[in-house]
Image: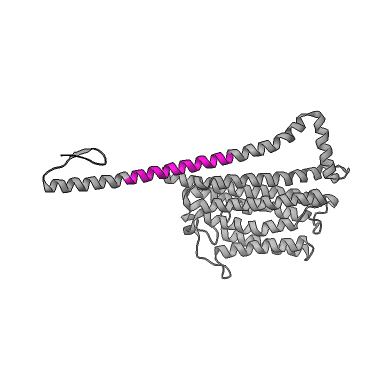
Amino acid sequence: MLLYGPFKWVRKSTDKFTRENESIYSRRNHYSLMNMQYENSSKLRSLKLNRRNSVIFAVLLLSLTAVAMPAAAEIINPSAECTAAEKLADACPFLDDGENDGLELVTFFLFFVGYISMGAAFVFFMSERSNVGPEHRTTMTISALIVGIAAFHYYYMRGVYVEHAVVSIEYRYMDWIITVPLMALKFPSLVGKDAITDKTFAGLGFTGICFTGALIMIGFGYVGEAGLMNEVLALILGGMGWAMIIVATGTPWSDGLGVDNSKIADELKWSANALRWFIVVGWIIYPLGYLFSPKVALIDAGTEGELWMGIAYNIADMINKIGFGIVAWMGAKKAAEAITE
């Protein structure tokens, strides 16, 4: 007798033992088919998700292009170029007052480029969450949060600069007090909890050291720039907070108190070391900007000091915040590729 099985027509035997074996085989094949269907549906869902993210990213890029096209048309048209320059001069009269116009224009455009680049990085990191392993999606979320928060504050800092010709330190430090601890959190989320040691410093573990160091560094930096404390003492105390983070995470040449390099996966070692380069070397730009701050003026540049401070801080933020995220993304992608191979 012929019966329809999950894969083919089978003949039902009259022998009891044979019928039982055929029944077991049929059930096994049924479960195998279900597993195959589940795996295929999972892959299909992942493919659809990636396609959806690609479509979203493409739409956002097209939107940015549409916004930029009118400005580009004005620049291409010589008669409109003067109009655009006049509009800019009307909106920001200090850009054409004959005093530090070059530096003022650079500062203005760095604020503009700052929030646009941070916003673009936010979209990129969020769209890449589905393309890394589950263990590194938190890393991508943290990367997106850092640049997203920075983009928000840069938008307002640009507004303050346009309306009042002032490089705001208040919005800057509001940004840093949130994003710098998040940058410290990115390290353990990338290398994994197994690579984080149980060693403590002053009763604080890895996360506690990084958070406390970030708060000390940002807090004393603000009171120094706001003129609430001796600027040199504030710089030294803020530097101690920076040193705490370096002690916890390590340097490109040595292990950190809270990190065991031998337990970092091979595909993540380059990225972990690159993050240390950012912390040890990339963050040096911030104290340089501090030296030019008007109320600090350890490097007295006159009326240009505030502008040099803004330029240094803007460049440092774009390099460190976006670069931090790109390096972490590269490591997460390598880890995902190593698993699939």
Q: Identify the residue at horizontal 54%, vertical 47% (top origin).
A: 329
Place residue 45 in its image quadrant: top left
- Compared to residue 341, the image places residue 290 above or below, namely below
Q: Identify the residue at horizontal 58%, vertical 41% (top origin).
A: 57
- Compared to residue 129, the image places residue 225 above or below, namely below
103 or 30: nearer the viewer: 30
x%, y% of residue 220? 71, 63
Magenta stretch encompasses residue 315: no
Q: How many numbered markers are drawn?
A: 0
69 or 297: nearer the viewer: 69
Magenta stretch encompasses residue 56: yes
Q: Quadrant of the C terminus?
A: top left
Q: Main secondary structure of the magenta part?
A: helix
Can see residue 287?
A: yes
Range of the magenta residues? 34-57
- Color style of the picture: one colour
x%, y% of residue 120? 63, 44
Can see residue 254?
A: no
Residue furthest left as drawn: 15
Residue furthest right as drawn: 98
Could you tell whether 82 is left or right of 328 in the image? right
Q: Quadrant of the N terminus?
A: top left
x%, y% of residue 30? 28, 45
